[in-house]
Amino acid sequence: MKPRIIALCGRGNCGKSTTLLELIQRLLELGWILIDEQKHGNGIDKMVVLRNKNGKLIGVATPGDHYNEVLNALSFLSKHSCLLVFCACRTKDMPGKDGLYLGTHAALRTFSEEITFIGKTIVQVEKKELYLEANRTDIRRMMEFVE
């Protein structure tokens, strides 16, 4: 069975990975158990599999800037048969030299037809409090899919 994917989308360096890392922390605080984790080569991003007390598996993948990053992350999570996956992706796919759209959206479509895109809340002013609130807003939106 293919997973339902909830993709947090936005331009590069807008806080997608940070928000998804905070989502992982929130799920752990709610009692979800870490089953498996794989770190990305950049030392920040990672992929995790979490299980609740009823045995439901959720995957969270924070790398999302390029086709191969998303493809590799979703490959890792699909091995665990996660039925719900949260991941990062770019706002839109850009065509390559050959005209094919092999961006993050194309990688998502490799794994599921059921994809919900959530736009990353963007903060225009350089204030840490606003960034934190934007992330909390996005996490609340994603948590609606958990239960």
Image (cartoon, rainbow, N blue to C red):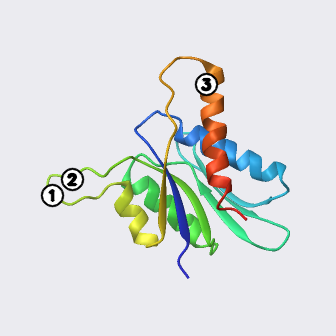
Q: Which residue is located at x 45 percent, y 56 percent? A: 70
- Estimate the x, y position of residue 104 in percent, counting from the top left: 38, 55
Count the numbered circles shown: 3
Q: Residue 99, labelled with which disc?
A: 1
Residue 8 visible in the snapshot: yes
- Estimate the x, y position of residue 88 in percent, counting from the top left: 50, 50
Q: Which residue is located at x 56 percent, y 42 percent? A: 17
Q: In which quarter of the image is the N terminus?
A: bottom right
Tell me how far mark 3 sits from mark 1, CA to CA: 39 Å
Residue flagged by tag 3: what amino acid is it? Answer: Leu
Residue flagged by tag 2: what amino acid is it? Answer: Pro
Upstream in sequence: badge 3 or badge 1: 1
Helix, strand or loop at label 3? It is helix
Helix, strand or loop at label 2? It is loop
Q: Which residue is located at x 57 percent, y 44 percent? A: 45
Q: Name the residue under label 2.
A: 95
Q: Are marks 2 and 3 in contact (CB under 8 Å)?
A: no
Q: Are marks 1 and 2 in contact (CB under 8 Å)?
A: yes
Q: How crowded is mark 2: few (under 14 residues within 10 Å), some or many (20 or more)?
A: few
Q: Residues within 10 Å of mark 1 (few under 14, many from 20)?
A: few
Residue 38 visible in the snapshot: no
